[in-house]
Amino acid sequence: MCKPAAEIEFWQRKEGSCLHRLDPRVKVVALIGFVALVTTLTSLFSLFLGISFLIFLISIARLDTRKVIKRLSWTVAVSGPLVVLLSLVTPGTPWYKLQVGPLVFTFTLEGVRLAVVLLLRLLNALLALCLLTGTTSFSELMLAFRRLYVPSLVVVLVEFTIRYAAVFVQELRRMFLARRARGFRVGRSLLDRATFLTLSQLVGALLLRSLTRSERIYFAMLARGFNGSPVRPEVYPVARLNKEDLLWGGLILAWALILHLLEMGVWEWNKL
Amino acid sequence: MHIPDGFLDAKTWLGATALSGAALYYALKKTQERWEDRQLPALGTMAAFIFAAQMVNFPVGGGTSGHLLGAALATFFLGPWGANVVLTTVLIIQALLFADGGITALGANVLNMAVIGPWVAQGVYSLVGYRNLGGTFLAAWLSIVAAALACSLELAFSGIVPLRLVVPAMLGWHSLIGIGEGLITCGVVIFLKRIGMVPFETLSLEVQKR
Amino acid sequence: MEQVIVVDDLHFKYPDGTWALRGLSFTVTRGKKVALMGHNGAGKSTLLWHLNGLFLPQQGEVRIEGRLITSSTEKWVRTRVGLVFQDPDDQVFSATVKEDVAFGPRNLGLPPGEVEKRVRSALAAVGMLGYQNHPPQSLSYGQKKRIAIAGVLAMEPEIILLDEPLAFLDPAAQENLCLLLEELHRQGKSLLVATHDVDFAASWAEEVLILKEGKLLAHGDPELLLNEDMVREAGLRLPIVAQIFRGLLPEGFTLPRDVQGARRILQAFLK
């Protein structure tokens, strides 16, 4: 019933490398900036350079490679088929014909190239995300978002949702298993009435529990003196950015910019 | 329907981000008015609920399955602004922690699933009311299809897929998913009605209009 | 002796029309250990919510330390009366333990240094000092319960209400909780525990309040729980140790209400 949930595991403050110690704001801005810049690249060469740089950073950060690969493989498995589909669908010069029974699939050159470009962009984005979440604890990330002017209600809601997501998912699972224990099996199509009836009951029951719980949580907040002022976390002293932060942040962004210039330069060469 | 990073070109994802940013800005104002100090427990539990509910897998046919989005359901109970905030929260978590949807594409995903989805559903509710089961089904179905349409337009504008191919493909597939969404949304509403939760608003912690 | 809680003819009806409390009247003396008992649905939780000012009485009044609970005093009430909810997941909502325990003191308007101090001492009191940066969802049920209690202790209330604190805890955790209650009692806090654990109430409480269907059935010392007719009417039972000795004791011997009492009787007979 449920898709495999990736582990949310970065609670503890992570120690381990110079990248872990960087100011989380710098990491957020630099890595998201990197992704923004690199995912608009179009040349295979520069995309490869992007990936190599990230792998280099990951090795410096001494991240667990198995976990990184696991993350990558899940997303690639989901996006992979789409990418393959695109290489079939893009118009252009035919490159490879695949015969499956009575059907003939024609991969175009442009299509394959596009698929590879998209895949490489995706890998860049995933590796950057792994780097960010692997070197920054969840609370640091949330604090960075607050300091970066993300509306505080949104940040608080994210924290709250994560706090209760596991609770609700477990309730849902338990209810699902209880039905399974009485013989329920998910049907095969939209036409299976029993399936949809049961799934609706599950979701409905969960909704009811959520709504009643929200009331009790509100009252529990009142019971501890909540008077309407926004829920704020501890006020951390605003750390000043030091040389190390600016150095690494600058390096990451510079690399992405250089790749862009490289790409433009390559085009310039081609025009000549 | 979560678009990954790299699939949209800069103009598209920047534009989408600007639009969803503006929508979120208004939504935050509106939810502050409606829930005041109860924003956190009311919207937070709904966000956790939607997050959990999105894990529900329903069969479509031929071995394929779909996932619940919950936009119409959230809009039913929270209105479009509340649904906007709740679904944005869920999408942020999915992008950040599960790599489900890209970071640069977050703006587009939010626009499709947290803005267009709820507002389309709200449009239907405004026309047919909340007690009309057919209307509820239509709201849910249309919210999925509209989001899928927006998604395909974004992909086409980015030059990834030709418009004439992506729109029928996305709409076709999501028309089926939309049926599942519609069935479950209606099922939930019926279930709650049957156990006596009418009017539904009594537990949504809204500030009573004075 | 000061009456810290005075309830007078309290009535409360839920929006759907069900009467939860019907004409309750009782007082609680400062520093006492009180067990609030009754079958499920008797009104225990509803009563607790009134004592903390979460619900305002529709009829009758509640006074805390002499002050009437009204919409203007309810905020003050919550600084004097702490309520530990039955389900810790309802109470512990923050992203980290430290933040959650700090929630109460911050709402009191205390400066950050004082908040920090209270968080530490509250966590130390419940034995969870090393867990400050843990997210609550990674904790076990018993640990979450302790954090919920810490969150209330950090506000340093004089009166502490606990709704079914022992429920779902394993025996070791229950014992730890009893020790904590003992410590709070020693500090002079007034404790009111809603429970339907008869054995616990009989051995721990100095006073027992028995509710039935929103009405006060009885109020007195724990010997009430040895009265068979009473416990049956209340939907409860005799303490286990009392059940063992029922019908076996000669004239002049009272049923024991806890293990110690039972041992004393046996020792007297074994001589």
Image (cartoon, rainbow, N blue to C red):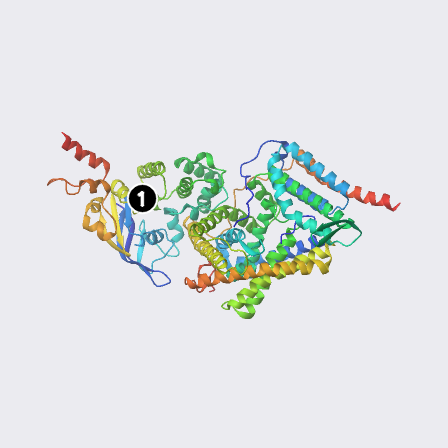
B183 to the left or right of C121? right
Of residues A253 and B77, which is closer to you in this image?
B77
Report the residue marked by disc 1. Answer: C191
State the quadrant of the C terminus of chain A. top right
> Mark 1 belongs to which amino acid?
Leu
**Taking C89 as reference, is B60 above or below it?**
below
Q: Residue placed at 34% from the left, 63% from the top?
A: C17
C175 to the left or right of A122? left
Instruction: Residue B104: tell me if it is visible.
Output: no
Residue lying farthest to the bottom in this orientation: B127
Residue lying farthest to the top in this orientation: C271
Picture quadrant where residue B173 is located: bottom right
Q: Position of residue A79 (x, y in %)?
A: 65, 48
Secondary structure of residue under mark 1? strand
Q: Please, which chain is the residue tagged with disc 1 on? A: C
Q: Position of residue B138 (x, y in %)?
A: 56, 65
Report the label total: 1
